[in-house]
Amino acid sequence: MTVFVITFLLGCLSVMTVRGRKGNWPAGMPVARPRLVAVGGTYEGTRGRPSDAYVVQERLIAAASGAVGAEPAHPAAALALGAVVTERPQHAGTMERDLRGCAQAAHRAVRAAALRDPACPELASTLDLVVLDRTEIPRLRYAHIGDGGIWHCPKGGEPRLVTTAWQGSGPRGVGLPAAEPEIGTLILRPGDRIALVSDGAVRTLGEVRTKQLLGGGASPSACLDRLYDEMAAAEPKDDATVVIAEFVTA
């Protein structure tokens, strides 16, 4: 049963459903739809042990990385993201407690899987999650737990790491004790970008080089290509995932 559930979740993560108005728009009527337009990918590590997963929707982007010291790592990430998608934080409201509850749901999903399988007592996953609120002033909420990172890349400005990397010993993430997420908000302008960078990518590129590669005026896809080129040269041992999303209003 557990294998079926995990397989089903993995199949669902790449699906995006957008519900809009029925019928045709009047001719010449502009469609203003604030949203996140994203590109992303996972550079597979040389260990041959998949660990990362991510999901992209119109106003929700999340990435997770299963703890490489635990088996199976990839299903832990899939379970965490499946719980996030089920919670629908982009529709639940605009309060910080919505994201906190979302992270708690991911924690419960991973922890429940660990309790069902005595062979995986330390099943865990990092989690980086951003939600674009439909408010008068565009606002992005984020939740973070683990050693990945969320970057804010303002249009015309320098990229800035807005989350704090885990500095303690051993893994930290949903499914483990003390899985309290870091919660925050950002005001966005059209053209601003958000980047979710997994722990494998952070270890491969380093914070300074990641900042350099995320900066500049290149398109999100060109920026992702540059990151991929450097990761290919470094040949990371673990999966390395980067998702870059641009805030657009038209």
Image (cartoon, rainbow, N blue to C red):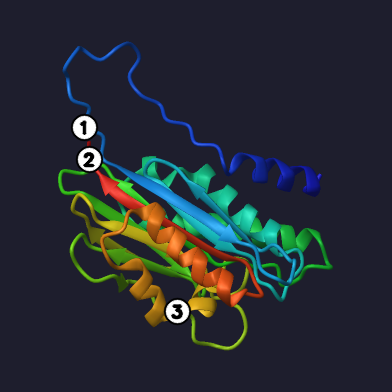
Instruction: Report crowding for label 1: few under 14, some 14 to 19, many 20 or more residues within 10 A (C-alpha).
Output: few
**In whole angstroms, how far apart are the C-alphas of marks 1 and 3?**
36 Å
Question: What residue would you read off at disc 2?
Answer: 249
Residue at figure coordinates x 49%, y 81% from the top left: 166
Residue at figure coordinates x 76%, y 67% from the top left: 71
**Where is residue 80, by image quadrant?**
bottom right
> Which mark is first along the chain, 2 or 3?
3
**Tag nearer the camera, 1 or 3:** 1
Question: What residue would you read off at disc 3?
Answer: 165
- Element marked by disc 3: loop
Residue 226 numbered mark, or none: none
Q: What's the amino acid at mark 1? A: Ala
Examine the rendering and report whether any part of residue 81 can be seen: yes
Q: Are marks 1 and 2 in contact (CB under 8 Å)?
A: yes
**In whole angstroms, how far apart are the C-alphas of marks 1 and 2?**
6 Å
- Element marked by disc 1: loop
Question: What residue would you read off at disc 1?
Answer: 32
Q: What's the amino acid at mark 3? A: Ala
- Looking at the image, residue 69 sits to the left or right of residue 125; the answer is right
Depth order, front residue of 140/208: 208
Residue farthest along the right direction in this orientation? 119
Instruction: Report crowding for label 3: few under 14, some 14 to 19, many 20 or more residues within 10 A (C-alpha).
Output: some
